[in-house]
Image (tube, rainbow, N blue to C red):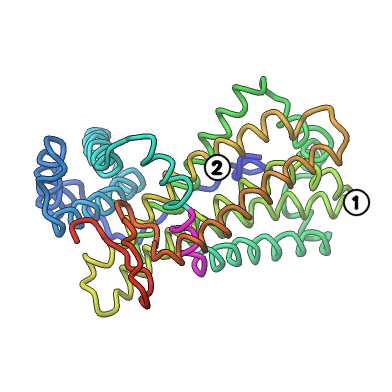
């Protein structure tokens, strides 16, 4: 569906940020020292990742997340293409280092897929549940309101727009392009939603909540209109084949963003910078893993949702893929947690001593 494309409104974009911005010059003056420090760490790590001390690795991850959030702020509040381009290049360089500090051997890739990613998701299961509830509540409020209130339906859009949407536009959307092109566009759209839900979480989680609520309202608007028109079957049979996996990925990205925001808001007995760096290592793992999940969801939307198959085959295919993913994450995540893994980037389990629980080794330990 492209999470943001199912309703007859423009895709929601966060239009506010907790960061207070005055002028471009003030923004640059306030943040230039951290940008320069990030450049120094990136340059050293690019030459030899082992050149960074453990606390510098944490600092690198923290600054990468901070500058990523500042890039979002600059795009939203400051009309300065040159500044945005410079920050984009800086974030791209730091991302290449942060995501590439470990050797890309097949063994590392396999371990990342089978252990590190599910461990990170399992570790973040509580904020993922909160993320799911925020979306579900927003969806339910809008859907039920429209389904039960003719006045709300009338206020949602002009009658001719609603009729075209219900009778033609919604279903035609899924066959508007060839499968490959459509899947690619959906993947890009959904990956952007996930990245936004995660990346802006560093601002105390508020923008993440904003993204979840707006997407819930948007999907709920479509559901409510179809229910009010007595054609709920069309909505659900077109949403479920890809939406189960797609929305689950959004919930996971939202949970990673909320956990990052909580680390900034309530770091506990850790320094705030240490808490952000620690959670950032797990959040990066989740985001990298979700790239593959969003790709699969895009393929389902491009090739299964609009396929000329029986309804049970289309919905069943999506349900099987979703159940396999959730089952794998739960089983593999619990097993990795039992081995002492929490999903942090570069984390390694240590051998279990007799009579002792598993001990986890972090980078530099």
- Which label number is shown at residue 293? 2
- Residue found at the far top of this picture: 178
Inspect the magenta stretch and tell me whether residue 119 lies in it. Answer: yes
* CA distance separating discs 1 and 2: 33 Å
In the depicted view, which residue is nearer to us: 264 or 105?
105
Question: The residue tagged with tag 2: helix, strand or loop?
Answer: helix
Tally of marks:
2
Task: Quadrant for the C terminus, please.
Answer: bottom left
The residue at 82%/49% (across/down) is: 226
Residue 310: give x, y in percent of width and height.
Answer: 88, 34
Task: Quadrant for the N terminus, please.
Answer: top right
Residue 23: give x, y in percent of width and height.
Answer: 21, 50
The answer to whether 317 is drawn above or below residue 135 in the figure is above
The residue at 26%/54% (across/down) is: 66
Residue 56: name its quadrant: bottom left
N-terminal-most mark, 1 or 2: 1
The residue at 42%/52% (across/down) is: 116
The magenta span reads 118-127
Residue 310 shown left or right of residue 160 in the figure: right
- Residue found at the far right of this picture: 230
- Which label number is shown at residue 59? none
- Which label number is shown at residue 230? 1
Inspect the magenta stretch and tell me whether residue 234 lies in it. Answer: no
């Amino acid at each position: 569906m492209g999470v943001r494309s199912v309703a007859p409104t423009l895709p929601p974009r966060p239009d506010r940020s907790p960061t207070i911005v005055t002028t471009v010059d003030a923004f640059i003056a306030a943040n230039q020292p951290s940008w320069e420090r990030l450049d120094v760490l990136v340059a050293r790590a690019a030459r030899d990742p082992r050149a960074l001390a453990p606390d510098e690795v944490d600092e690198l991850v923290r600054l990468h997340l901070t500058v990523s959030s500042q890039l979002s702020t600059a795009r939203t509040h400051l009309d300065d293409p040159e500044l945005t381009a410079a920050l984009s290049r800086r974030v791209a360089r730091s991302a290449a280092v942060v995501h590439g500090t470990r050797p890309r051997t097949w063994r590392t890739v396999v371990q990342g897929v089978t252990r590190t990613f599910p461990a990170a998701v399992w570790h973040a299961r509580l904020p993922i549940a909160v993320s799911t509830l925020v979306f579900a509540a927003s969806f339910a409020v809008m859907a039920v309101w429209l389904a039960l209130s003719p006045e709300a339906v009338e206020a949602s859009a002009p009658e001719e727009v609603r009729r075209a949407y219900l009778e033609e536009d919604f279903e035609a959307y899924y066959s508007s392009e060839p499968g490959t092109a459509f899947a690619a566009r959906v993947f890009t759209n959904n990956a952007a939603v996930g990245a936004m839900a995660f990346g802006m979480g560093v601002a105390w989680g508020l923008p993440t909540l904003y993204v979840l609520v707006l997407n819930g309202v948007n999907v709920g608007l479509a559901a409510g209109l179809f229910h009010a028109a007595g054609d709920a079957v069309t909505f659900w049979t077109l949403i479920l084949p890809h939406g189960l996996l797609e929305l689950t990925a959004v919930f996971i990205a939202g949970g990673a963003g909320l956990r990052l925001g909580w680390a900034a808001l309530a770091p506990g007995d850790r320094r705030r910078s240490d808490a952000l760096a620690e959670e950032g290592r797990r959040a990066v793992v989740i985001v990298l893993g979700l790239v593959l999940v969003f790709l699969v969801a895009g393929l389902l939307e491009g090739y299964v949702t609009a396929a000329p198959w029986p309804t049970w085959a289309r919905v069943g295919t999506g349900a099987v893929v979703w159940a396999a993913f959730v089952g794998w994450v739960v089983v593999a995540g619990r097993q990795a947690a039992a081995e002492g893994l929490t999903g942090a980037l570069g984390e390694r389990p240590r051998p279990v001593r007799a009579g002792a629980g598993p001990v986890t080794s972090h980078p530099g330990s």
